Image: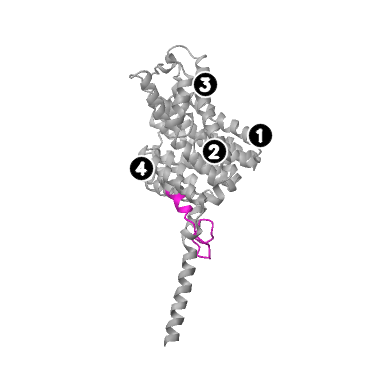
Amino acid sequence: MLLESTGIMGFISEKFLDFLTFTGFANLEWTNLVMIFVGAFFIWLAIKKDFEPLLLIPIGLGIILGNIPFKSVGLEIGLYEDNSVLNFFYQGVKLGWYPPLIFLGIGAMTDFSALIANPKLMLVGAAAQFGIFGAYMIALLMGFEPNQAAGIAIIGGADGPTAIFLSSKLSPNLMGAIAVCAYSYMALVPVIQPFIMRALTTRKEKRIQMKAARPVSQTERILFPIVGLLITTFLVPSGLPLLGMLFFGNLLKESTKTARLAKTAGAALNDIVVMLLGLTVGCSTQASEFLTINTVKIFALGAFAFIIATASGVLFVKFFNLFLPEGKKINPLIGNAGVSAVPMAARISQQEGLKADRHNYLLMHAMGPNVAGVIGSAVAAGVLLGFLS
């Protein structure tokens, strides 16, 4: 009996010691702590500073979750382990399922009336895409392969879903860093853009008041997604997954006959996809995969692309105004809205306009280039995908 008890105690002791080797404390590395701190910082920014909480809270917790250290012994719990739950969710990022679904939701929530009423604002959204192609050239000069450079450059559009979609096709090995970088700069729009806008505009330009846009008929709103789909996808068929879902969602909204579908696409479905995308993108930043020199380069190039995109939009409006008569000039402060961060970039235009003149309301005017930027970044992604495939 005593020998039997001794054998049981030995077995328990052995298994307990094995258990200790599997704990996070036993497998902890300093890089895990760095990434956990980064995740906590994202959550702090979301809660304390109100920087895109719907994105940064899932991403921040995902970063923490993805950097809990463990010893892989076939338990199938890690993001990069086949058959794990996290790996199953990550397929939506890896295979590009989530971005088109998010574009469906964006289309269902977006009112394109400001752009329809003033089509020349499409040019402002197009001008802001210069940051993408400028960053692409710089990335090539820094030694990135063409496909990798394209995935990095799209960060300049400030469009997280588009960045994920393109990088999943062209540079999957850099997708985690690209996705986190893109969403980080989307959240930091209120921090980065105002300085650029103030530096590039005069006091007189900031005070330009734009006339109220003309009313847009329901017929125009219904025709816009159909015509927009045909024009953009005939021009760039490779952008079909994003552009098709964007205009589909908008048609659901504007037809007035599918209000239930539009509400589902823009609310419940969109929220579910955003949660899964944010969490799994965060989990993909495991320290061993994320803390590299390439990640530092990607964040630097992303910042460069975003700054150039913002400046391009503002400077293009200033240039365009040279050809417009008095009374029809565009306030350059809406040029920043050419990036795809809807509607945050448009709100920044409004805030800066009110600082210059408390009677100057730019929000509805800024929504024109803002929604044009969504279309423009998807077209730019299609161009790069078609060019490099």
- Is residue 143 visible from the viewing direction of this image? yes
Say what amino acid the circle numbered 1 marks: Leu
Mark 2 touches mark 3? (CB < 8 Å) = no
- Is 160 magenta? The answer is no
Quarter of the image with the N terminus is bottom left
Which circle's residue, 1 or 3, is located before the other in the chain? Answer: 1
Residue 160, position in %: x, y? 49, 40
From the viewer's side, name the closer residue of 11 and 256.
Answer: 11
Q: Which residues are magenta?
A: 61-84
Q: Earlier in the sequence, mark 2 or mark 4?
A: 4
Disc 1: which residue: 141
Q: Which residue is mark 2?
A: 299
Q: Give yes or no for contact between labels 1 and 3 (Cβ–Cβ under 8 Å).
A: no
Q: Position of residue 164 (x, y in %)?
A: 53, 44
C-alpha span from label 2 to label 1: 16 Å
Q: Looking at the image, which residue sits at the far bottom? A: 1
**Residue at the location (47% across, 67% down)?**
19
